[in-house]
Amino acid sequence: MSESLSKKGNRLAIVVPCYNEEEMLEKTISVLLGVLRDLSGKGLVSEDSFLLFVNDDSKDKTCEILKEKAEKEPHVCMISLSRNRGHQNALMAGLSTACGISDMTVSIDADLQDDVLVIGNMVEEYLKGADIVYGVRSGRKTDSFFKRTTAQGYYRFLNSLGVKTVYNHADFRLMSRRAVAELLRYREKNLYIRGLIPELGFKTAEVRYERKAREAGESKYPLSKMAALALNGITSQSTKPLRIISFIGLMVMLICIVAAVYALISYFTGNVEAGWTSLILSIWFIGGVQLLCLGVIGEYIGKVYSEVKDRPLYCIEEKILKGAGVSDV
Ligand code: UDP
Ligand code: MG
């Protein structure tokens, strides 16, 4: 490693949000500890690098397993949230805890779907000067047809709204300490972290990998949570839907003017078409458009409401940071 590269701090924290992951945890901990050993053996990360698990108020034995490991194993730390706040908030809790005690963080899911072997490549990119290194899936073969098509359609939709996103990147990424510190300055409550990261700027890099299927347990992202995240992605990054509503309103008005002219001509030429079906259908149609538009506006007003209240994203109930050489608080 060149002189200038080795001067860069290289204490790594791998941040892992966990919700009901008892079936995966033992394996995840041992695989990630193996990654740390390997990387510190190669001199890429310092020997005091560590794993930081965030228990998102799991209902199974996740918390017990994490506590036991964090008490006994060096390099294993955990924090526990006071109630389930969802993946994005749990990740923020982990990043904010790791920020002061590491030089870089890698965020990864507990189910090992993301390829841990590319963490080494991420660290190399960091040492070469990148502040943010995106893990990008080279394909979506392991996703179901439904998830694959909806995800691709969603990314395209976000793009058309002008939202910058990295295609096929979720939350598997490396961030330098200063990038995390800047991210933490974003005070928003309706989080869509992968939409915020490109906002930060900084030098970025990408590493590609094949995403595997979940080895054990079920997805902790049911359709409702996925839809909420997708909605946050749109409403927290773009106000274009509001403009689209104005456009729809204008279009409907124009159609009405054309229909009125047509009705007048029919009246004067004596060809008045009777029938309430067309009347009722158009009333229902306009009613539907109005309700939809009100719903979209309401969605933004709801978001403004929760942002204005400025409530904390999470509450940390317990911290065991011995594994990082920090005394417990
Ligand atoms: N997760 C979390 N809180 C939640 C839901 C999920 O911390 O309320 C964690 C979960 O344990 C996993 C990550 O978020 O580490 C991603 O979840 P999952 O792998 O189930 O999502 P998928 O890969 O199916 O999108
Ligand atoms: Mg997963």
Image (cartoon, rainbow, N blue to C red):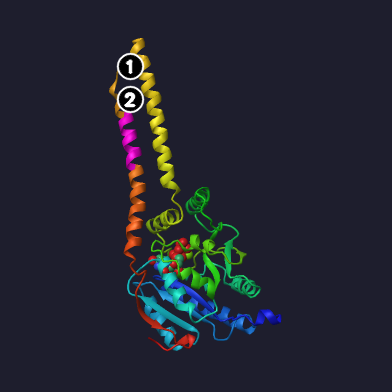
Instruction: State which quadrant residue 206 falls in.
Output: bottom right
Q: Which residue is mark 1?
A: 273
Quadrant where the N terminus sits is bottom right
User: In this orientation, does residue 200 appear?
Assistant: yes
Give the residue at x 48% y 88%. Answer: 325
Quadrant where the C terminus sits is bottom left
Q: Is residue 258 above or below residue 40?
A: above
Q: Is residue 193 magenta?
A: no
Q: Is residue 42 above or below residue 283?
A: below
Identify the magenta region. 281-291
Is residue 41 found left or right of 221 in the rendered image?
Answer: right
Dot 2 amino acid type: Ser
List x then y, in percent, for residue 112.
Answer: 51, 70
Q: Residues within 10 Å of mark 2 (few under 14, many from 20)?
A: few
Q: Is the C-beta separation of discs 1 and 2 under 8 Å? A: yes
Q: Is residue 287 magenta?
A: yes
Closer-to-camera residue (119/157)? 157
Closer-to-camera residue (322/300)? 300
Dot 1 amino acid type: Glu
Residue 278 shows which numbered tag? 2
Secondary structure beneath disc 2?
helix
Q: CA distance from mark 1 to mark 2?
A: 10 Å
Closer-to-camera residue (259/92)? 259
